[in-house]
Amino acid sequence: MRERGVLVSLVISSSLLPVALGVAVNVATGGTLPGPLSPLTALAWPVVGVLTITTAALAVVQSRPVPREPGTRPAPADLPLPAAGLAGRDDELSRLRVLVAGGVRAIAITGQAGVGKSALALRLAADVGGRFPDGHLFTDFGAGRTTADLLAWFLTGLGEPVNAALTEDQLLRQYRAALAGRRVLVLLDDAPGTEAVRPLLPTAPECLAIVASRRPLAGLDEAVHFPVPALTAGAAVNLLAAIVGAERVSRDPAGAEALVQACGSLPLAVRIAGARLAHRPGWSITHLAERLADERSRLDELRAGDLAVRSSFQETYDDLPEADRQAFRRLGIVPAATTGSPGRSFGVATAAAALGAPGRDAEAALERLVDSGLLESSGPGRYRMHDLLRLFATECMTAGERADTLDRLIDHYVTLVDDDELAGERDALLALLDRAVDDGRRESAWRLWKATRRSATLHADYRFRVAAAGRAVRAADDPRRHTDALWELGRATDLVGGAVQAHAMLSEALDRWAGEDADRYLLLCHLASASDHLGRLDEAAEHASAARAGFAGLGDVEGEAHALTKLGSIALRTGRAPEAVSLAEQAVALRRPRRDEPDSELAWSLLELGTALLDTGSPEAAGAAFEEALAHQRAHRNTRGEGRTLRALGWLADVNGRPADALAHYEEAVRVLATMGPTVDYGLAHESVGDSRLTLGDPEGAEDAYRKAVDIFVTVANPVRLGIGLLKQAAAQVELGRLRAAGEAEQRAAGILAGVDIAEVRAARDRLAAARRSRPASA
């Protein structure tokens, strides 16, 4: 009774002291006391000091477990030791402590296998255990004991006699009676479900239950639910450092990043990898990361002592009914995309295709797997499978299941490739192509590529075209298909700016091509473009002229218009603007009568015509051509064409003496083309912004825009554009007085542009020379 009296006194004191301290601080900082007490105002600061020390001392006393009287019931201490460190979970642990301090009586910590639920629960129990002096109970459901067994176990720990003849209900009543009036912490690890947990939850208000489970325990209304998210990559690296030492990680940061990426930032996997490294001081982190890079053996590598990622997954998998196990296996090869939610996920329709089930049945299976902790629900109708779980799922698959699932998925995507919603499914398509090629299902891979090629061309998705064509080259199983895929790879590479590689691939494809047909002449046009982008304008004209003659001989009007448009562009770049106008007018005349609806191909010819007209001093006619081209490009949602035409409207505004309008057009082109990622056109848009800012007297803004353009040209490996960009950047740097940087940029450009003599290069050199001449002699 003495301890209970002490406790009451402490509670009353802890309530009154903050009030008294608040009054004292108020008076000390200018507040007033009632009239009779005003003489005590001078004592305010000394009182603040005394009360502050008293409050701190009381907090220390309250944090200590209350001593027990001799002869009272035993206080069980069943908690295992927590992990030495819990790197990356400081935020979660802090929020859990707040919940406990707020009087929460049950917390359900949930998450997938290996995410660190048990470690977090144990650390929380250790941190708050002092609040529960009457004992700490622990059980791991993985031992397979019944509820009656666990109740008897807990009763024994609480010092209660247990009669073996008692029923489960009788044991439950005894358990609750034993906890009444006591402050006990109960930790339930690896809980299989709500029904198993509920009887073990204390009903006494002074007790706390902490439950860790792979299942969401949605029906456990008595608990506050606390889902444990995956670690961030940075937190996973910190966890690795806590195991192997920060110095070791600091010596090999790239290896550490690669290792945690291979582990999917799953704490169990990172701990196992860290344990292996800790016992192998001669291994570098990079060495283990390289061993983990091979997906076929990754789960074998993630084993240390009695810890293994595979066995952690296996327990959950074995608990599933066969129908759900089959669904889990098949979902292992469903490719993840970036649509619908943060991260990589897939939707119900894709899952239904893989499972060969109606959408409603597939969604039900997906939700059951979420409840089992083998899938994550990443948003409405979207699901995610951890990479290591994916490897485990495919490992469990039979060859027949894999082949059947791949074919179902390919059939599904072939029907979707023209759907606008597919834009976020590009990564999924590439993964599916990889799997089909790796499994030797070349015909299926080729069928999928042909379908995606049409869609990617329609949506001007050039980087996807490059990636998909590279896989098509691997899938091609005869010479004609190989040449076709090589041609597409070269064309797409040229469109993103890789003119050197594109020229080599297109040249090889032309050498392989058999026969004189329309496809050969179109290939010649594409090779002409690559030659043009490399500054080989005579070669480009030769290829385009041959293509024009070939198309004319076949009576192919569209093909001839394509070649004429290319020839007009080359004529303009070689200073023959009147000839460029004539060639572009012929191309427009051939294309305009074809149809009344918007026409993206006509738009390209109109763009070339407008550019040539502008160069010959006909800005009004040029503007009409540009506006018509822009309407066609926007109607077809041709991002590249829209961006180019916006730049052309910027040139027109410059010619008409409206530099501010020109800058607005260029900046809009930057915004439009940014959606395509690094391409030559995106770099050129930044370059145009730089030109405009330099004209407007903003060399700082110009230098920044040119720097962005140069970075893009480096990325896409386009040497001619890079050299021109460097010359323009040097001109801005001269105007800013950064002469050393300008000299370095000019020297770099000279090496790149050696032997290249085209109008744009000459104009960039002239502008740099003019900038130097305009600087004061003393500068």
Image (cartoon, grey):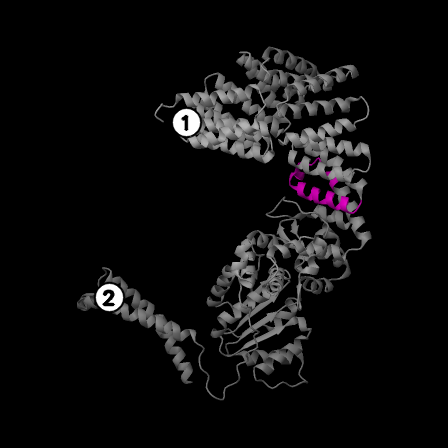
* Residue 584 picture location, percent across and down: 64, 15
Classify mark 1: helix, strand or loop: helix
* Residue 721 picture location, percent across and down: 57, 28
Q: Is residue 430 magenta?
A: yes
Magenta extent: 413-440
Label ID, residue 45: 2
The image shows residue 354, relative to residue 181, as above or below, that is above
Classify mark 2: helix, strand or loop: helix
Asked whether the beta carbons under mark 2 and mark 1 sit within 8 Å of each other, the answer is no
Q: Is residue 174 magenta?
A: no
Label ID, residue 735: 1
- Does label 2 or label 1 sit earlier along the sequence? 2
The image shows residue 747, relative to residue 270, as above or below, that is above
* Residue 717 picture location, percent across and down: 60, 33
Measure how far apart labels 2 and 1 are at the Cα level. 64 Å
Rendered-image quadrant of the N terminus: bottom left
Q: Residues within 10 Å of mark 2 (few under 14, many from 20)?
A: some
Mark nearest the camera among 2 and 1 is: 1
* Residue 730 picture location, percent across and down: 47, 28
